Image: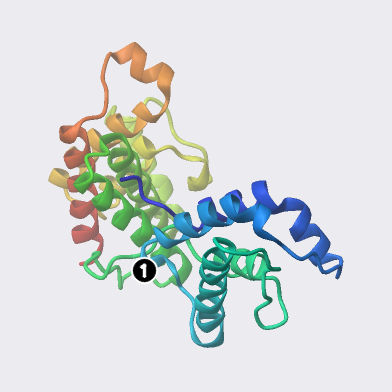
């Protein structure tokens, strides 16, 4: 069964009840009756499939979320026998309230078993990389090889960029010069590492001794597989993402985390 995320329900609500939401925004009350039963039923059914870990609401917001869904379910039962206007919840239309609360919820979360990254001092970056790692592992378990491959490659890129930016500019420049002299880079990269591609980040990180040679070798595979996100390249090299590419990319990421945590 496909994984349902909060933004899907928000999009469905916007598609089916866009005019209602706009009227509520303007302060104009618009009662909803039995004629909208099919749309309400579809919305409630989809919302009920959202994994509980993605409902990141607390306190009064979570109570309002439960109340909105309960009101909608109760209306569906009532509409089976008679027509009646949809009751409001906390002085708000329950559909509008449900949409507002779901819009605050993420489409992905960090599973408890995801590798910690305590060495990254930027909390926002740390959480972003961990989300990619968690999503890559989930995609691997679900057999979504391309998603796992690309997400792991993206997390590798973010990790190596973070470490490269931590290096002193003179050390970074010297590492890039050595990588070019050794032939692993065709030309010196631009001065700003944020403009570098994954291949350049790997080779400079290796010259900085931020990662070991075995990790560099594994990451080179991840670099090649990450490029397969571009359809043209995948067609040219005749390669597709599979379980092997996913495992290689995730292995490269875990190797990099091990080295950078030292």
Decide: is 34 above or below 247. Answer: below
Q: Which residue is mark 1?
A: 53
Asked whether, in this view, residue 4 is left or right of residue 195, the answer is left
**Residue situated in front as seen by the camera: 78 or 123:** 78
Q: Residue furthest left?
A: 214
- Local packing at callout 1 (Cα closer than 10 Å; few below 14, some 14-19, many 20+) is some
Identify which residue is drawn at 53% across, 71% down: 74
Q: How is the image coloured?
A: rainbow
In the image, 28: left or right of 57?
A: right
Which residue is at the front of the view, 166 or 43?
43
Give coordinates of residue 31: x percent, y percent. Answer: 76, 66
Give me the residue at 35% from left, 45% from top. 2
Relative placement, left or right, of 18 versus 2 is right
User: What is the quadrant of the N terminus in the image?
Assistant: top left
In this view, 85 is above or below 168: below
Mark 1: secondary structure: helix
Image quarter hosting the C terminus: bottom left
Picture layout, residue 128 above or below residue 62: above
* Residue shown at 65% from the left, 79% from the top: 89
Residue drawn at 56 percent across, 74 percent down = 71
Which percent across, then down, holds residue 220?
Answer: 24, 35
Tally the marks. 1
In this rendered view, identify the residue nearer to me: 114 or 95.
Answer: 95
Give the percent coordinates (x, y) of residue 117: 30, 68
- Among the 4 quarters of the image, the one containing residue 201: top left
Judged from this view, the residue extending furthest toward the front is 81
Counting from the top left corner in percent of width and height, residue 204 is at 34, 44
* Residue 94 horizontal side relative to residue 260, left or right: right
| Closest to the observer, 126 or 61 | 61
């Amino acid at each position: 069964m496909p994984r349902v995320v909060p933004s899907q329900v928000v999009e469905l609500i916007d598609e089916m009840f866009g005019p209602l939401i706009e009227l509520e925004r303007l302060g104009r009350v618009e009662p909803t009756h039995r004629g909208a039963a099919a749309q309400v039923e579809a919305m409630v059914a989809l919302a009920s499939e959202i994994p509980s870990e993605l409902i990141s609401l607390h306190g009064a917001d979570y109570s309002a979320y439960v109340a909105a869904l309960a009101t909608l379910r109760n209306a569906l039962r009532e509409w089976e026998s008679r027509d009646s206007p949809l009751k409001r919840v906390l002085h708000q239309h329950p559909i509008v309230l449900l949409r507002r609360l779901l819009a605050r919820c993420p489409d992905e979360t960090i599973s408890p078993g995801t590798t910690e990254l305590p060495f990254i001092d930027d909390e926002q970056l740390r959480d972003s990389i961990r989300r990619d790692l968690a999503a890559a592992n989930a995609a691997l378990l679900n057999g979504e090889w391309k998603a796992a491959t690309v997400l792991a490659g993206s997390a590798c890129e973010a990790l190596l960029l973070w470490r490269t930016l931590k290096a002193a500019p003179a050390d970074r420049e010297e590492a890039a010069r050595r990588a070019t002299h050794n032939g692993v880079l065709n030309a010196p990269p631009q001065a700003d590492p944020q403009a570098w591609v994954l291949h350049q980040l790997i080779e400079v990180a290796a010259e900085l001794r931020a990662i070991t040679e075995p990790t560099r070798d594994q990451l080179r595979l991840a670099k090649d597989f990450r490029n397969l996100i571009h359809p043209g390249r995948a067609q040219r090299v005749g390669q597709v993402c599979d379980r092997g590419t996913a495992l290689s990319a995730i292995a490269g990421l875990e190797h990099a985390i091990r080295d950078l945590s030292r």
